[in-house]
Image: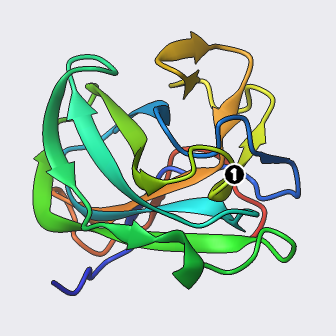
Amino acid sequence: MACVGDSIQTSQEANNTLDNRGAVNNVGQSFIIPDDATICAASFFGGKGGSSGIFNVELRSGSYGGTVIATTSSIDSGTLSSYLSPVWQKIEFNATVDLTAGTTYYLRFNLLSGSSNDIIRLGRNSNVYADGQWYFNATAFSSLDLQFRIHGVAASGGTAYRRLQPFAGL
C-alpha cells in the first residue's frame, strides 16, 4: 500500500534527545486527532540502536492496552538509519484506518524478536504535546512525549495541511 497524503500530522519538534530505555518493547504515545481523518502511516524521530531485532507498531483505541485497529508489518531494526544520525523514520500501516475527531488513540511499539535492549532509539521531548503522553512498560509519563507524526488525509478537505503541534522543521 502506498501511503499518500501527509495532510494530517501529529508532530514533535525534532531534537537529538534519544531514549533507549527498553528500546522498543511496550513503548508508545497517546494522541488526539482534531478532525476526522483516514490515516496510513506514522513516523518517529530516531534510528537503529546498538542491537538488532524485529518490531512492529500498533495503533490502538480505547486505552494503551485497548483494541488494535491498525498494525505495521514486521520491521527489521537493521533497515533503519543509525541513531547516531537520527532522522524521521516513516512506517506504513498494513491498511488505512479512519479516525474520529476528539478521540484518543495510542501508538505502541512492540518487540517481536531479538534483544529487548536497544534495537531502536526513539526521540522524546519534555511534555511539549498537550494532547497525549509517553508510555514506557505500559506506564504513562505525562512529563514526556514521543517525537512522532501521523500521516493521512483529513475527511473535510483531503489536501489541506493540518498541524496538531508546532514543528519547526517544516
Q: Position of residue 104 (x, y in %)?
A: 32, 25
Say which of 123 and 32 sits in front. Answer: 123
Residue 170 visible? The answer is no
Q: Residues within 10 Å of mark 1 (few under 14, many from 20)?
A: many
Seen in the picture, residue 165 relative to 133 is either above or below; the reply is below
Residue, x 24% and y 67% (percent of image)? 73
Q: Position of residue 161 (x, y in %)?
A: 43, 67
**Which quadrant of the structure image shows residue 121?**
bottom right
Left or right: 121 as drawn, with respect to 157:
right
Left or right: 147 as drawn, with respect to 69:
right
Residue, x 52% and y 25% (percent of image)? 132
Left or right: 135 as drawn, with respect to 13:
left
User: Residue lying farthest front?
Assistant: 114
SS at circle 1? loop
**Which quadrant of the structure image shows residue 81?**
bottom right
Residue, x 73% and y 32% (percent of image)? 128
Say which of 155 and 44 sits in front. Answer: 44
Seen in the picture, residue 140 relative to 79 is either above or below; the reply is above
Residue, x 35% and y 56% (percent of image)? 56
Seen in the picture, residue 73 relative to 129 is either above or below; the reply is below
Q: How is the image coloured?
A: rainbow
Q: Amino acid at mark 1?
A: Asp
Total marks in image: 1
List the residue tagged with mark 1: 118
Q: Quadrant of the C terminus?
A: bottom right
Seen in the picture, residue 108 relative to 63 is either above or below; the reply is below
Q: Position of residue 164 (x, y in %)?
A: 52, 45
Residue 89 visible? The answer is yes
Q: Quadrant of the N terminus?
A: bottom left
